Image: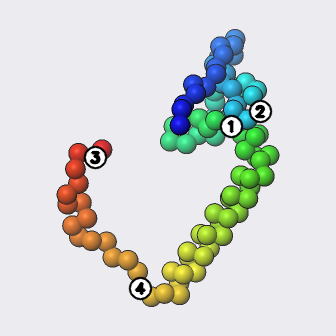
Amino acid sequence: MKRVPRLKIETELGTEIQCSRCKDFWPADREFFDTARGKLHAWCKACYLSDEKVIQKAERWKESLRAARAARNQGGAHETVPARATEGRGANG
Ligand SMILES: [Zn+2]
């Protein structure tokens, strides 16, 4: 996968970035773009809200959460965390 740098323009109001879906420029701001781990999403908020797939995905995610919760309630067994889980961790991080 190749990363394409996002287009951005400087306006009198500040930096604006291009939404990769509607191709409009919006202020690079949390008002207009959702953020994930401090980074702005590729799509503007409006596109996210109007996209059917996102809504469907959210519904499926909610369903899987419900299923996981139900499974947890039914089965008495719960996972135990190995006491030495951190052992052997390399130069990761
Ligand atoms: Zn958009």
Return the residue at label 2. Answer: 22
Q: Amino acid at mark 2?
A: Cys
Q: Residues within 10 Å of mark 4 (few under 14, many from 20)?
A: few
Q: Would you say residue 32 is visible in this rendering?
A: no
Label 1 beta carbon within 8 A of ligand 1: yes
Front residue of this view, candidates 73 and 86: 86
The first of marks 2 and 1 along the sequence is 2
Q: Nearer the viewer, mark 3 or mark 4?
A: 3
Q: Amino acid at mark 3?
A: Asn
State which quadrant residue 7 falls in: top right
Callout 4 touching callout 2 (CB < 8 Å) = no
Disc 2/disc 3 C-alpha distance (Å): 38 Å
Circle 3: element type: loop
Q: Amino acid at mark 4?
A: Ala
Q: Which quarter of the figure is the C terminus placed in?
A: top left
Return the residue at label 3. Answer: 92
Q: Height in image: 7 above or below 35?
A: above
Q: Residue at x 78, y 52 (%)?
A: 52
Return the residue at label 1. Answer: 43
Q: Residues within 10 Å of mark 1 (few under 14, many from 20)?
A: many
Q: Residue at x 51, y 80 (%)?
A: 72
Q: Nearer the viewer, mark 4 or mark 2?
A: 2
Front residue of this view, candidates 71 and 11: 71
Circle 2: element type: loop
State which quadrant residue 36 falls in: top right
Q: Residue at x 66, y 16 (%)?
A: 9
Front residue of this view, candidates 3 and 24: 3
Return the residue at label 4. Answer: 77
Callout 2 touching callout 1 (CB < 8 Å) = yes
Callout 1 touching callout 4 (CB < 8 Å) = no
